[in-house]
Image (spheres, coloured by chain):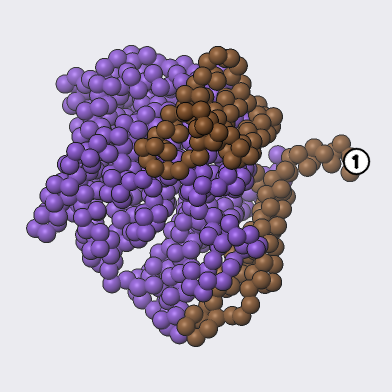
Chain colours: A purple, B brown
Amino acid sequence: MDTFSSLMDGFGHALTPTNLLFAAIGVLLGTAIGVLPGIGPAMALALLLPVTYAFDPTGAFIMFAGIYFGGMFGGSTTSILLNTPGESAAVVAAIEGNPMARSGRGPQALAAAAIGHFVGGMIGTILLVLLAPLVAGLAVGIGAPDYFAVMVLAFVAVTSVLGSSRVRGFASLAIGLAIGLVGLDPLTGSQRLTFGIPQLADGIDVVIVAVGIFAVGEALWVAAHLRRTEQEVIPVGQPWLGSDDLRRTWKPWLRGPLIGFPFGAIPAGGAEIPTFLSYVLERRLSRRRDEFGKGAIEGVAGPESASSASSAGTLTAMLTIGLPTTATAAVMLAAFQQFGIQPGPLLFQRESQLVWTLIASLFIGLVLLLVLNLPLAPVWAKLLRIPRPYLYAGILFFACVGAYAVSGQPVDLIVLLVIGVIGFFMRRYGLPVLPAVLGVILGPDAELQLRRALQIADGDWLTLVSTPLAVIVYLAILVLLLVPIARKFVKRPEKEREPADH
Amino acid sequence: MSAPIDRTWLKDHSELGISAFLFAAGALVLGNTLLETRGGGSSSDPLGPHAVPLGVGMLLLLLAVLLTLDVLRGGKGEAESGDDIDLTHPSDKRTVLMLAGVLVATAVLIPLIGWPLAGMALFWGATYSLGSREIPRDPLIAAGVSLVTWFVFDTLLGVDLPGGPLMGLI
């Protein structure tokens, strides 16, 4: 039982007073941020990246993990009480949760969501413990060509699956790749896209890109369309569940993770698709199908459990292969890079203690979240009333602090603004944000793996398809690229009958 | 086409600006790579430092063309929605420009008056731009947020934020 002893070792390190404190700060911040409308977990982590300069890696990641799960917990509170979900992962929670709150069953909806997150997170993390060492063990043998293929898959999957337009997805990716090129070439030291400006030689820091796109871009975009009318917040009491509700919810809680975990681990999976699938499944299985849409508790319990389990799946892919499948994981990967740690199969050998402490702190964080969220829900709900000018001024303020902290140069605020403006126009014209961020973070890695592969093979391009894994991955990419084109081809006759302009 | 029709056409197709941006970025990447860096790969690095930038540059140009075609065929990017977003009214350009101005002013002010004061100007300026006019409350909250943040980062976390001339007073 090597895994078990490593995990126990991890608990030993995670249960020190300092690390417990980090976990507590993380879950509190995460829940607050998740509840606050307009701030998602990705933006929260991006804003907190600079804080980690002062921490040791273990403490920082314990806190980040708490924020990740806490954001999920908090996000469902917003959905249930406001009916306008901030994160796409919490959309489904609003479908049944908000009608429940409206009909006076808010406490039950909040409890079903919170316990759902707890159960989903626990099962997901147990799966992470069981699977991660296996995956890491298998992945140790994979070489540069495989890594390159997997990264290309991540790029293509993220641009093809998310968003409605693939041209716009790829445009976003290309912008990110171009930003990632700026600076000195890591292999030869020659300057690329620096235009002779010395500040650009170090490249544009990932922190500034992430904060610029997630925080400044979002704040500017919201500022341009700020809702002028007050939204109705449904008042809520202490969350609790009666025995009748418990009978209805325990099965959905257990079913959710089975859908959530695998989707979290695949590129471009994230939590959106599994929460929706879980909702559909619960509706089909329920004996009270007529209640769905009017406040069925199963429709809150299943999807919320799936959503937290998908976070654990995302962490599995990120820790074992170094592949971020969601925006939040992409920012976490950037944090690892800030510390000079490369997630991937070797992480479990080189940073064994860090990884297992992090995993142990996931369990601790989930318990803390459940303990904090059930009694504190009415307090969190008060955050929904924060005046919006303060909220968005605060986001801009902390974005500037973060960007400045990177290197102590006021010029970085201008770079931050430029990237924020790019983020603004991306939101205005429907360019998804995630491909750009993934391009900045993974682009330089992908280039390095490509060049390393060709280095080893003396410039023979066939090396890229020399392993079975790489071939399988390229076939998957081909399918992803061709399916929509084929579908368009089949649909064309119908489309031609429509009038040309509408 | 007469002038007024031209203008509404441009307004409906303002997304072509994104195509132009992609084209400009592509041209910049390609131009810079072709002009500034010399020599190809070597035996130890067959691909060399330019191959990927050339690829990215060409990808940007290709996407500029594809996006232009998409927009001319009537394709439209979907504006992002969210908690506090009301897409029924058009973009409030004044607020966005004011916020951008506040950020630029902060960058200029930091070396002159230090973080605590510049941060306060930033927070208050942002709340003002966003439409809040609570006179004693807004600047007080701004001062509080800025001072606490400066103290936490500079003193507790050891992230260097210059105190500026204010430090002479303490």
Q: Quadrant of the rendered structure where residue A29 is?
A: top left
Q: Quadrant of the rendered structure where residue A80 is?
A: top left
Residue A303 is left or right of residue A131, and the answer is right
The residue type indicated by label 1 comes to: Ser
Pick whichever, A284 or B117, lies toward us.
Answer: B117
Q: Report x, y in % for residue A56.
A: 30, 49
Quadrant showing the N terminus of chain B: top right
Instruction: Give me the residue at 66% from left, 71% from top.
Output: B36
Residue B129 is left or right of residue A134, and the answer is right
Residue A79 is left or right of residue B31, and the answer is left
Residue occupied by mark 1: B2
Q: Secondary structure at mark 1?
A: loop
The chain holding disc 1 is: B
Looking at the image, can residue B91 be seen?
Answer: no
Q: Report x, y in % for residue B45.
A: 49, 80
Pick whichever, A335 or A285, lies toward us.
Answer: A335
Q: Does residue A107 lie above or below A358 as drawn? A: above
Q: Report x, y in % for residue A43.
A: 45, 40
